[in-house]
């Protein structure tokens, strides 16, 4: 499969060639969404990292542009962010400058006056250097009458907040953490203001990626609901996991995205096996973009993620149908979206089989007694690492009717449960001939209230 051209997904961004990991510099500017990303164009593994660049009008179809910020022998260009500096009508990239000789990590700037196509480094770089080898991933945003930056001290498991009036001179302001999951080092912080559903309220959410200890094993993401005040960020409830699957990391928000709901996008992989998954002339993809809201559950607020998807055409639909055993659907697809409202009835377990073929399938299953939803990729195709072929489970949102929205692509399934209250993101590498989709119920009968397959 390593030479199979069908590894190229339809609905997920991939580079033309080379290695991809974290998204960087996400911003909406002058009618374009900009996706910069960690990129090694000359190899299929992580190496001297530059910033790749792509643009889109709709977050679905992307045009890759020339490499934006190039690595040199003296400086590798690690993760960061981009803002629009209206006072000078320019885009400003804040990134971690990594010195490969010493391991030192400091924050530097580059400027663009041509919509991100070309960049000029700031002559006074770095603009923030604390003499550390674990100080990285600056996310810059407007705050009050100036600018703020959240940046991790990775080994300390903290997020430090800095303030600046001009993006050049930075003053340390406050520290958050350690808190929540601290097994792995912290990376790629972001603070987003998120609306609370059915209210006029908002809350601040801190996103933090962790290199180990996530619920599906290896790397993952946690989030803290709280508030960002003049005193800094403080959490108001315990940390939660952003994604219960193994393959969502380093997601950050698009600066200046239209609308009230912030939009995030992440890297679809896991540091456990990122450099071993099947590849052709490229390795690595992004998740679909996701719009965020908060939903009240008891005394807590839960982050809800809704995928930004291609409109497509309905290829198959069902309404008010009972299913017992397995019911194949009259559709074949390697890339599609399945939306289903299902109810347990007497079934002990029910759900979807995706990318069904000769001995292959990815199973999305609801267990109403255990109150879990799971993705089983043990029979999903090629696995090149011992940790890959596994079943991953998550708590089932509280509802009699379970909504499953699944974005299926050539090499992935992204499962949004309960309108996006629970998410599991999974890479899969089935044979191209595995194109079937079915609904199943075990130990009784389940009810399909509605189901549609959109291509």
Image (cartoon, rainbow, N blue to C red):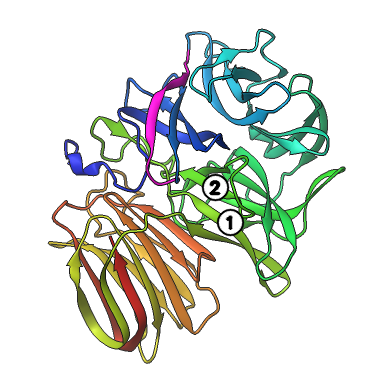
Please tell me which residue is depicted at 21% across the width and 79% down the height of the picture.
Answer: 327
Tell me where residue 135 appears, x and y as whole percent: 66, 27
Mark 1 Cα-neighbour bin, 10 Å: few <14, some 14–19, many ≥20: many
Tell me where residue 171 appears, x and y as whole percent: 82, 26
Q: How many marks?
A: 2
Q: Quadrant of residue 279?
A: top left
Label 2 to label 1: alpha-carbon separation: 8 Å
Tell me where residue 401 appears, x and y as whole percent: 46, 82
Residue 223 included in the magenta stretch of the image: no
Mark 2 Cα-neighbour bin, 10 Å: few <14, some 14–19, many ≥20: many
* Mark seen at residue 264: 2
Report the quarter where the C terminus lies: bottom left
> What segment is highlighted magenta in the picture?
59-71
Q: Which residue is mark 1?
A: 292
Please give left or right for residue 372 compared with residue 89 in the image.
Answer: left
Tell me where residue 332 appears, x and y as whole percent: 18, 63
Q: Earlier in the sequence, mark 2 or mark 1?
A: 2
Please tell me which residue is depicted at 35% across the width and 32% down the height of the picture.
Answer: 15
Please give left or right for residue 405 compared with residue 194 in the image.
Answer: left
In this rendering, does residue 182 appear at all?
Answer: no
Dot 2: element: strand
Q: Quadrant of residue 48?
A: top left
Dot 1: element: strand
Please tell me which residue is depicted at 26% across the width and 40% down the height of the picture.
Answer: 278
Report the quarter where the N terminus lies: top left
In this rendering, does residue 325 appear at all?
Answer: yes
* Mark seen at residue 248: none
| Location of residue 371 with respect to 445 vertically, above or below | above
Q: Quadrant of residue 172?
A: top right
Whether tag 2 and tag 1 are in contact, CB under 8 A, the answer is yes
Q: Residue furthest right?
A: 231
| Location of residue 228 with respect to 79 vertically, above or below | below
């Amino acid at each position: 499969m390593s030479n199979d051209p069908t590894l190229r997904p339809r609905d997920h961004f991939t580079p033309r060639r080379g290695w991809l990991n974290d998204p960087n510099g996400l911003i909406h500017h002058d009618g374009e969404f900009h996706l910069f990303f960690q990129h090694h164009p000359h190899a299929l593994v992580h190496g001297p990292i530059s910033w790749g660049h792509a643009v889109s009008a709709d977050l679905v179809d992307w045009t890759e542009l020339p490499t934006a910020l190039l690595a040199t022998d003296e400086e590798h260009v690690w993760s960061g962010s981009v803002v629009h500096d209206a006072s000078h009508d320019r885009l400003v990239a804040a990134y971690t400058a990594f010195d490969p000789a010493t391991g030192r990590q400091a924050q530097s700037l580059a400027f663009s006056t041509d919509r991100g196509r070309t960049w000029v480094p700031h002559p006074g770089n770095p603009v923030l250097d604390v003499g550390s080898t674990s100080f990285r991933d600056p996310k810059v945003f407007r705050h009050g009458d100036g600018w703020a930056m959240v940046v991790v001290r990775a080994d300390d498991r903290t997020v430090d907040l800095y303030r600046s009036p001009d993006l050049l001179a930075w003053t340390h302001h406050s520290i958050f953490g350690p808190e929540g999951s601290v097994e792995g080092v912290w990376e790629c912080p972001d603070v987003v203001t998120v609306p609370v559903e059915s209210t006029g309220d908002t809350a601040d959410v801190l996103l933090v990626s962790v290199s180990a200890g996530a619920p599906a094993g290896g790397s993952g993401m946690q989030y803290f609901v709280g508030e960002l005040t003049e005193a800094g960020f403080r959490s108001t409830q315990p940390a939660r996991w952003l994604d219960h699957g193994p393959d969502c990391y380093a997601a950050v928000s698009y600066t200046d995205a239209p609308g009230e709901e912030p939009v995030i996008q992440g890297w679809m992989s896991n540091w456990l096996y990122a450099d071993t998954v099947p590849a052709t002339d490229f390795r690595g993809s992004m998740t679909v973009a996701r719009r965020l809201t908060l939903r009240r559950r008891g005394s807590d607020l839960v982050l809800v993620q809704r995928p930004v998807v291609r409109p497509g055409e309905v290829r198959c639909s069902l309404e008010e149908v009972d299913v017992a055993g397995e019911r194949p659907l009259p559709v074949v697809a390697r890339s599609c979206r399945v939306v289903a409202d299902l109810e347990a009835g007497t079934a002990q377990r029910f759900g979807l089989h995706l990318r069904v073929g000769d001995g292959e399938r990815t199973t999305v299953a609801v267990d109403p007694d255990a109150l879990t939803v799971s993705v089983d990729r043990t029979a999903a195709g090629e696995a090149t690492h011992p940790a890959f072929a596994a079943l991953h489970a998550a708590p089932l949102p509280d509802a009699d009717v379970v909504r499953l929205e699944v974005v299926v692509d050539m090499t992935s399934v992204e499962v949004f449960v309960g309108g996006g209250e629970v998410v599991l993101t999974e890479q899969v590498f089935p044979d191209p001939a595995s194109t079937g989709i079915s609904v199943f119920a075990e130990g009784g009968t389940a009810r399909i209230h509605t189901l549609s397959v959109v291509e």
